[in-house]
Amino acid sequence: MDLTIRPYTPADYDWVLQCEVGLQEHERAIHDTRLPGLPHSRDYLAMLWDELAEGHGIMLIAETPRGERLGLVAGHIIDAPWPMETRDSTRYGYVSDIFITAEARGRGVGGWTVDAFLGWLAGVGVRSVIASVRPDNEPSLAIIRKLGFHQTGEAVDEEDGLEFVFELER
């Protein structure tokens, strides 16, 4: 598949908002605590942009040569120095969002997009990466596992409930 993976630009906002609204509506069907996709996805994106800015993060967009957007990944760096730990052990990347359009699922787009994020992290000197995924999110679990992440535990997220925690060292 001929694919370009590039950083988000403001011209992508409406498409990204549609992706987040779709995700929120999907999650509303699973969790009765979820609010409607609009206007709450706008609030989420505002929070995400702040997290990416504060955590030195990035959102990457996967698209065809014709400019058809197929997916996105967002993530940032968590830097939590601790006097008793090495610098490498307290600075790591975090995959916060993965979205692949229905038409592009199963075609490698998710893996290529997350791999581009991993490459961005390596370019800024981050070797360790964490991702947390709900047990029922089979597409994201498949991407993470295929890229070599290994499950290191479980956590209960305030919003999503039980999540599997994965790590990757590069």
Image: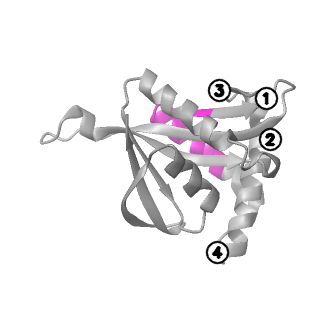
**What's the residue type where badge 2 is placed?**
Trp
Residue with the mark numbered 2: 15
Quadrant housing the N terminus: top right
Instruction: Tell me which label, 3 or 4, sits earlier in the chain.
Output: 3
Which residue: 77% across, 33% down? 12
Image coords of residue 44 (percent x, y): 63, 51
* Residue range (magenta): 44-59
State which quadrant residue 58 falls in.
top right
What secondary structure prevails in the magenta region? helix
Residue with the mark numbered 4: 31
Label number found at residue 7:
3
Mark 4 crowdedness (10 Å alpha carbons): few <14, some 14-19, many ≥20: some
Between residues 81 and 133, which one lies in front from this camera angle? 133
Q: State how far apart marks 2 and 1 are (Cα).
A: 8 Å
In the image, is residue 11 part of the stretch drawn in magenta?
A: no
User: What secondary structure is marked by label 2?
Assistant: helix
**What's the residue type where badge 1 is placed?**
Ala
Label number found at residue 11:
1
**What's the residue type where badge 4 is placed?**
His
Which residue: 59% across, 68% down? 136
Image coords of residue 48 (percent x, y): 58, 44
Q: State how far apart marks 4 and 1 are (Cα).
A: 31 Å
Q: State how far apart marks 2 and 4 are (Cα).
A: 24 Å
Instruction: Tell me which label, 4 or 1, sits earlier in the chain.
Output: 1
Can residue 150 be seen by looking at this rendering? yes
Q: State how far apart marks 1 and 3 are (Cα).
A: 11 Å
Image side of residue 102 versus residue 31, left or right: right
Q: Check the image and name the residue furthest to the left.
A: 84
Image coords of residue 97 (percent x, y): 59, 47
Which residue: 42% across, 23% down? 124
Given contact means CB atoms under 8 Å apart, are the residues at marks 3 and 4 in contact? Answer: no
Label number found at residue 66:
none
